[in-house]
Amino acid sequence: MTEEKWQGKAVAELAGTDAELVWEALEDFCNLHKWMPIETCYQVEGVAGEPGLIRYCASSVQHDFPVSDSANTTTIKWAKEKLLAIDPVQRSLSYEIVDNNVGFASYVATIKVLPIHSHGSQIEWAFLCDPIQGWTIQDLKSYLHSSLHFMANKLQLAHPTHSTQP
């Protein structure tokens, strides 16, 4: 018997940050390391900005417990992600994890940037995936929520609130 797929969505508002500025940062599929708490993200195949592009994302994780003979061990957590669709007019992109060592068997996400209020925006990060061994759906939702809010904070710092009024 197979488990049902997990699905959910994280949302973050960026008050005073224009949706177009947020989209300009996120539409570059291979600059994720500028906005997320990961160490590297780069193109491994495909054409920049077009469906089929594959990026490699990785971070090292420090373990304080001994593994074999060493006191501290670093593990590289990585994923290869394929751009499935990108729509600059709707400010959305979809991608899937095609290979990883984190535990994802099937994962597809869509990120949308929506205008809200006057010069504000909202990022929506929706996902659909197979259950991940050793995780609960709440673990995944919590991870996406904290990652998205980290991203939103970095984007707001990069594009401080500005007023167009005299």
Image (cartoon, rainbow, N blue to C red):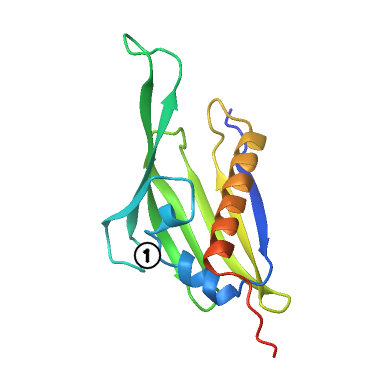
- Residue that extends furthest to the top in the rendered view of this protein: 69
Identify the residue under disc 1.
51
Task: Please determine whether, in this image, residue 78 is positioned above or below residue 133.
Answer: below
Residue 84 or residue 39, whichever sits in front: 39
- Residue that extends furthest to the left in the rendered view of this protein: 45
Amino acid type at image mark 1: Pro
Task: Please determine whether, in this image, residue 147 is positioned above or below residue 154.
Answer: above
Which quarter of the rendered picture does the N terminus lie within? top right
- Residue that extends furthest to the front in the rendered view of this protein: 166
Residue occupying image coordinates x 56% and y 34%: 131
Residue occupying image coordinates x 37% and y 39%: 78
Residue 26, percent across and down? 48, 64
Residue occupying image coordinates x 42% and y 27%: 62
Residue 164, image quadrant: bottom right
Which quarter of the rendered picture does the C terminus lie within? bottom right
Q: Secondary structure at mark 1?
A: loop
Residue 135, percent across and down? 58, 29
Residue 158, percent across and down? 52, 65
Disc 1 packing (10 Å; few <14; some 14–19; many ≥20): some
- Residue that extends furthest to the right in the rendered view of this protein: 117
Q: In the shown orientation, is residue 80 left or right of residue 12? A: left
